[in-house]
Image: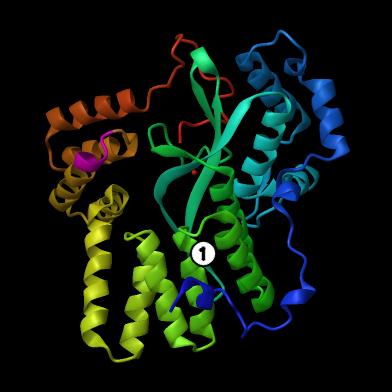
């Protein structure tokens, strides 16, 4: 089945009734936002360097309370986020990036690797990804501004992405939220936009499209969409898991077993999954197994302080005080504050993380 066939969406009625926000509207500043920036950010004046502009912007938003956003899993435009004071990481990123660009900063979107975060919404389990803002300060280095300073840690791993790729994230979020409200026609339009106007290789949108088809019992379309997601991202656990469930219901046991094994194999390669297994083992009193999982996790990712801290605690439970102390010191060292190339602390440490 071709991409065009999957994106025709003839089964979804009422598509013409919906108005989807344009890429320009997603990042647009309102007159109130512009007046706020003109009044509060000295960096809009000539002669101010990028570092001063960024500090001014963060200070202005902190003073106004705009950075004390109430977390909400809903996705909003930049203007909606500023007006309502709530949203998710995508919402915050839209708002901050649009403001940063207005005051002349070289700001872009970033995808950030974070520990897998599964949540249940209605009848679905949702795997959250993360996005934040990357500000290039030239000779003063790069600052990553992030709304989620709890789950994102320095060294998490990040990569700058294009505005079109960020658009895929936004429209995919809106599509998933529409699915939860059972607004299938609107959800389909958002998911199609995520791919056609965002990125045709954005696997989450193909996976969500497959879920929509599966709910309509259009199994051939669902299978094709899940396979397309894996073509775009071979390690997409959501697509693999959904394929495995689909093949179980169809009695295609060999294929079901194949994808079940692939899911487990990829999970074990994930250091955060190993960390979760280590925590479970620790809580069950199996400290030797916890150590084994943590060593595997650290071999994959050696810059997470939580890994070393749990390893220290595991060795303490095993009576090995030397290693417990050794890994406690390592945990402290990894968690130490990251500084700019000139040695100064990163501004607004309570908001920023080298992370979404």
Tell me if I can see residue 297 in this picture. Answer: yes
Q: With 38 as the anchor, is 139 left or right in this view?
A: left
**Is the residue 66 above or below the residue 344 in the image?**
below
Q: Position of residue 86 (x, y in %)?
A: 71, 48
Nearer to the camera, 336 or 171:
171
Residue drawn 36% across the image and 65% down it: 230
Q: Decide: is 276 above or below 348.
A: below
Binning the other alpha carbons within 10 Å of mark 1 as few (below 14), some (14 to 19) or many (20 upward) gives many
Give the camera-side residue of 268 and 143.
143
Q: Position of residue 331 (x, y in %)?
A: 29, 30
- The residue located at (31%, 23%) in the rendering is 333
- Element class at badge 1: helix
Residue 238 makes an appearance in the image: no
Residue 73, given in percent of the width and then of the height, sits at: 61, 56
Magenta stretch: dominant secondary structure: helix
Which residue shows up at 70% across the image and 19% down it? 56
Q: Image quadrant of residue 103?
A: top right
Residue named by callout 1: 205
Identify the residue shown where x is 49% and y is 89%. Answer: 217
Number of numbered tags placed on the structure image: 1
> Which residues, given as a range, are shown in magenta?
298-302
Q: What is the quadrant of residue 18 in the picture? A: bottom right
> As rendered, which of 173 and 154 lies closer to the eye?
173
Q: On the image, which quarter does residue 75 sit in?
A: bottom right
């Amino acid at each position: 089945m071709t991409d065009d066939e999957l994106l025709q969406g003839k089964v979804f009625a009422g598509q013409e009734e919906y108005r989807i926000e344009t890429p320009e509207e997603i990042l647009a500043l309102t007159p109130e936002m512009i007046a706020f920036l003109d009044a509060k950010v000295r960096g809009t004046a000539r002669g101010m360097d990028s570092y001063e502009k960024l500090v001014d912007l963060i200070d202005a938003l902190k003073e106004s309370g705009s950075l004390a956003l109430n977390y909400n899993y809903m996705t909003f435009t930049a203007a909606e986020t500023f007006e309502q004071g709530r949203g998710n990481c995508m919402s915050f990123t839209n708002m901050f990036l649009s403001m940063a660009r207005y005051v002349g900063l070289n700001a872009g979107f970033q995808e950030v690797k974070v520990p897998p975060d599964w949540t249940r919404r209605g009848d679905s389990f949702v795997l959250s990804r993360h996005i934040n803002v990357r500000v290039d300060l030239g000779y003063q280095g790069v600052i990553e501004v992030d709304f989620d300073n709890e789950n994102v840690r320095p060294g998490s791993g990040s990569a700058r992405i294009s505005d079109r790729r960020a658009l895929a994230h936004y429209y995919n979020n809106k599509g998933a939220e529409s699915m939860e409200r059972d607004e299938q026609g609107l959800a389909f339009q958002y998911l199609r936009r995520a791919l056609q106007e965002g990125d045709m290789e954005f696997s989450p949108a193909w996976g969500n499209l497959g879920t929509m088809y599966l709910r309509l019992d259009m199994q051939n379309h669902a299978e094709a969409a899940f396979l397309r997601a894996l073509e775009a991202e071979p390690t997409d656990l959501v697509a693999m898991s959904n394929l495995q469930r689909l093949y179980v219901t169809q009695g295609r046991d060999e294929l079901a077993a194949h994808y079940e094994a692939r899911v487990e194999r990829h999970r074990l390669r994930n250091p955060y999954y190993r960390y979760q297994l280590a925590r479970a083992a620790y809580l069950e009193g199996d400290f030797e197994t916890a150590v084994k999982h943590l060593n595997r996790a650290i071999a994959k990712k050696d810059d997470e302080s939580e890994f070393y801290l749990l390893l220290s605690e595991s060795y303490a439970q095993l009576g090995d005080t030397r290693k417990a102390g050794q890994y406690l010191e390592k945990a402290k060292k990894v968690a130490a504050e990251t500084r700019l190339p000139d040695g100064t602390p990163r501004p607004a440490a309570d908001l920023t993380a080298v992370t979404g």
